[in-house]
């Protein structure tokens, strides 16, 4: 239900207009660059239209997928491969089992180059990728090297060297931000938007963060079209902005919890593994923070119909969290908890 982020480099963002139509429930008018979105009956939804197609109300598809070792399983989410669902949990293969991929190994193992499940490497040990390290650590290895060191997530202070920095981000850094310096990659301090947030901007323009004193650098991102009634564009959030602090604080809490150690190595950051093992309130709070950060531009100034068609995932998670923390509609909160975990879980 969540489309790819829409970006206009011509300087004009599309507008979103709510209507009462159902067939079609979604259409696009090129002359005005306007999406018209209608409402659908209960148990149906309106698929997101495109510039070249209209959409009609359809039945809400049933969420389905496969659960990995240690995760919650049922008839909708059966266990992957040959794992067995026992008391709603997928079994864990015995140590030393043969494998071709990580999903065939237990929660504390990875599939080694020899084709056998091996124990995850502890902090300080040698590794070639994050998935070889214990679940609360990542592999500090450069793209030109075959071996690195397992380092605990969010443990490197600003200014400390880093083997590799990808698109200005590394979960090994306390701030989650990094930069490529003249002598190699370095962790940055916490940076935020230069303007009050949400910062409006011209589509395609460069958005720049505050300057990091430890590395004398800033982060950059592109101004992106939002889903608003008047075609407004916004700068994405930076890690030091309120929504970024909320998200990375919640992610830090997850990586420091014992629950992450119950996930298969490749599922350590999977929403479904969080749903399977974490405290309900922590999980719902994480969902709100995660979608609030990753969908930051998209959720600004949404008309009601946009919330139903494009950004439903965020608003569903927010409603679930509010219901749970306010102790209202407990049954609804539990249902929304599951629904929010499956809409964009990527299982």
Image (cartoon, helix red, strand yellow):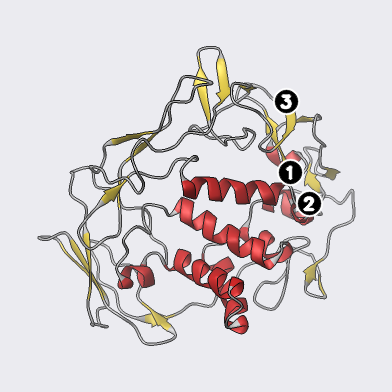
Q: Is residue 333 above or below residue 2?
A: below
Q: Is residue 65 above or below residue 101?
A: below
| Secondary element at image label 3 | loop
Residue 318 location (% of width, % of height):
50, 67
Residue 341 location (% of width, % of height):
58, 66
Residue 276 location (% of width, % of height):
71, 65
Query: Which residue in the protein does label 3 denote?
Result: 147
In three-dimensional space, the C-alpha distance between marks 3 and 1, rounded to whole angstroms, equals 19 Å
Residue 40 horizontal side relative to residue 32, left or right:
right
Tell me the crowding category of disc 1: few under 14, some 14 to 19, or many 20 or more residues within 10 angstroms, Cα based. many
Q: In this view, does 6 lie above or below 68?
A: above
Return the mark for residue 136: 1
Foreground mark, 2 or 3? 2
Q: In which quarter of the image is residue 270?
A: bottom right
Point out the tag, 2 or 1, that comes first from the N-terminus: 1
Q: Is residue 338 visible?
A: no
Tell me the crowding category of disc 3: few under 14, some 14 to 19, or many 20 or more residues within 10 angstroms, Cα based. some
């Amino acid at each position: 239900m969540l489309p790819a982020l829409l970006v206009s480099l011509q300087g004009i963002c599309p507008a979103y207009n709510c209507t009462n139509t159902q067939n079609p429930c979604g259409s696009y008018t090129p002359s005005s660059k306007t999406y018209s979105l209608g409402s659908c009956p209960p148990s149906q939804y309106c698929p997101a239209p495109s510039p070249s197609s209209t959409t009609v109300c359809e039945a809400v598809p049933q969420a389905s997928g496969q659960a990995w070792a240690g995760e919650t399983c049922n008839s909708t989410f059966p266990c992957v491969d040959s794992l067995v669902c026992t008391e709603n949990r997928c079994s864990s293969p015995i140590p030393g089992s043969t494998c071709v991929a990580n999903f065939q190994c237990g929660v504390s193992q990875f599939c080694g180059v020899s084709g056998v499940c091996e124990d995850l490497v502890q902090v300080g040990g040698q590794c070639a990728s994050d998935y070889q390290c214990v679940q609360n650590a990542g592999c500090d290895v450069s793209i030109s090297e075959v071996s690195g060191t397992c380092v605990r997530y969010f443990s490197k202070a600003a200014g400390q060297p880093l083997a590799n920095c990808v698109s200005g981000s590394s979960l090994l850094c306390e701030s989650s931000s990094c930069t490529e310096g003249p002598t190699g990659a370095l962790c940055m301090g916490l940076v935020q938007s230069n303007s009050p947030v949400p910062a409006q901007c011209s589509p395609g323009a460069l958005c720049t963060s505050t300057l990091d004193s430890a590395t004398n650098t800033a982060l950059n991102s592109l101004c992106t079209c939002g889903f608003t009634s008047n075609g407004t564009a916004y700068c994405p959030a930076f890690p030091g902005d309120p929504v970024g602090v909320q998200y990375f604080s919640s992610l830090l809490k997850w990586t420091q919890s014992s629950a992450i150690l119950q996930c298969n190595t490749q599922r350590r950051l999977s929403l479904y593994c969080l749903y399977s093992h974490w405290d309900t309130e922590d999980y719902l709070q994480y969902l709100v923070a995660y979608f609030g950060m990753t969908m930051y531009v998209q959720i600004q100034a949404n008309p009601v119909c946009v919330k139903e068609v494009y950004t439903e995932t965020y608003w569903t998670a927010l409603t679930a969290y509010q219901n749970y923390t306010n102790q209202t509609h407990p049954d609804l909160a539990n249902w929304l908890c599951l629904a929010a975990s499956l809409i964009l879980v990527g299982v």
